[in-house]
Amino acid sequence: MNITIRDEADKKAETKPVDSQSELRQDIITGDWVVIATGRAKRPDDFAKHNRAHEEVNAFDPFIDPAASGQKEPVLLYRKPDGDWSLQVIPNLYPAFVSGRMPKDLSEGPYFAMNGVGYHEVVITRDPKKSIAGLELWQVAEVIDAYQERYLALMTKKTVKYIQIFHNHGKEAGASIAHPHSQLMAIPVISPYIDLQLRGAELYFRNHRANVFQTILDHEHETGKRFVYENEHFLVFCPFASRVAFETWVMPKRSENPYFERITDEEKIALADALQKSLQAIRDGLGDPSFNFFLNTAPCDGREYPHYRWHLEILPKTSVWAGFELSTGIEVSTIEPERAAEYLREQLAA
């Protein structure tokens, strides 16, 4: 009979209550609050749905041969040396915004409204199965090229004040077509979220005489607690006030950099590398979850925004909003960004 003898320190460690005090963290840019619910904390690998079945969100793939499926003529087409296309950008067949003249006032009584004038395009990569995480680096860089080309083509349109570029992966993230694709919407208004970031950046500069994005970059680089990946031009990290578990930002290091459309060729390669590494870590560590990523940049409305810095935000779908989130607008994350970043770093080192 084996008897294990444990000392008093071991026994006390077993009975000592776990520190379950949650944290309220404030976003340094927007002022928004988030809850890091450590009392309900999960281990990082608890977020992985092993053997995750990605059901076909739409059995019919209209993007495998866009012309044959009745899609509109491409506005941008990249070809491989063999003549086959590698990427194309097409107008959305069912656009949220439709090109036209200046917006018309559709106000009613105390309510303000206008018609949805703008542009809605789809950026399609050739392979119907390979997400951005699984592409070759040159293919990811080609996606970035397309983002910039279409941004430059649309930013001078009279009806356009802001251009939102985003990517939905998986049904839970709103992807209605499984074939990997990004979307670009050029709209006549500035989104409330971007406006909040712009105002926050301006306010921070007035109060501290410093750029808030550079302050974030310097602190994350110095502490390394939420650092995920780095190359010559970009730093990848989990934000201090992460809105969701494993939220990840890809931020350029170059200062005075409000406008994505001014990205250099060298920076495009580096962005492709940083974005791909981020998505690979999320895919491998969390079992290929649904996610959204979007590119935030200064508006193209003719004004100057010297205190802003464009960046990419990646939000994996690991939970859904419930009563508290819906009623307060305060999001709850069940893992500390520090642990999330450490876990993602481990995926890249494996």
Image (cartoon, rainbow, N blue to C red):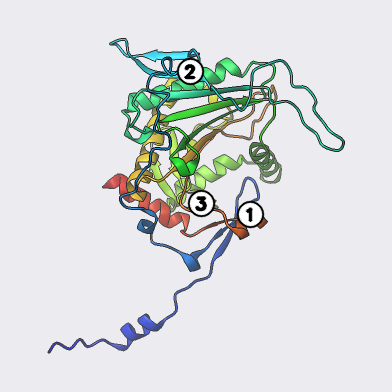
Report the amino acid beneath label 3: Val
Could you tell me which quadrant the N terminus lies in?
Answer: bottom left
Closest to the observer, 22 or 235: 22
197 on left or right of 281: right
C-alpha distance separating marks 1 and 3: 14 Å
On the image, the x and y values in percent for residue 41 come to: 45, 64
Q: Quick check: marks 3 and 2 in contact, CB under 8 Å? A: no
Report the amino acid beneath label 1: Leu
Residue pointed to by mark 2: 71
Closest to the observer, 172 or 164: 172
* Numbered badge on residue 326: 1
**Compared with residue 286, is residue 188 higher up or lower down, i.e. above or below?**
above
On the image, the x and y values in percent for residue 9 come to: 33, 84
Q: Quick check: marks 1 and 3 in contact, CB under 8 Å? A: no
Query: Is disc 3 placed on a helix, strand or loop?
Result: loop
On the image, the x and y values in percent for residue 242 come to: 52, 51
Which residue lies at the image location 64% right of the left edge and 23% below the top edge? 300
C-alpha distance separating marks 3 and 2: 35 Å
Q: How many marks?
A: 3
Residue 36 appears in the rendering: yes
Q: Quadrant of residue 7?
A: bottom left
On the image, the x and y values in percent for residue 94 come to: 56, 25
Answer with mark 1 or mark 3, whichever residue precedes in sequence: 3
Residue pointed to by mark 3: 244
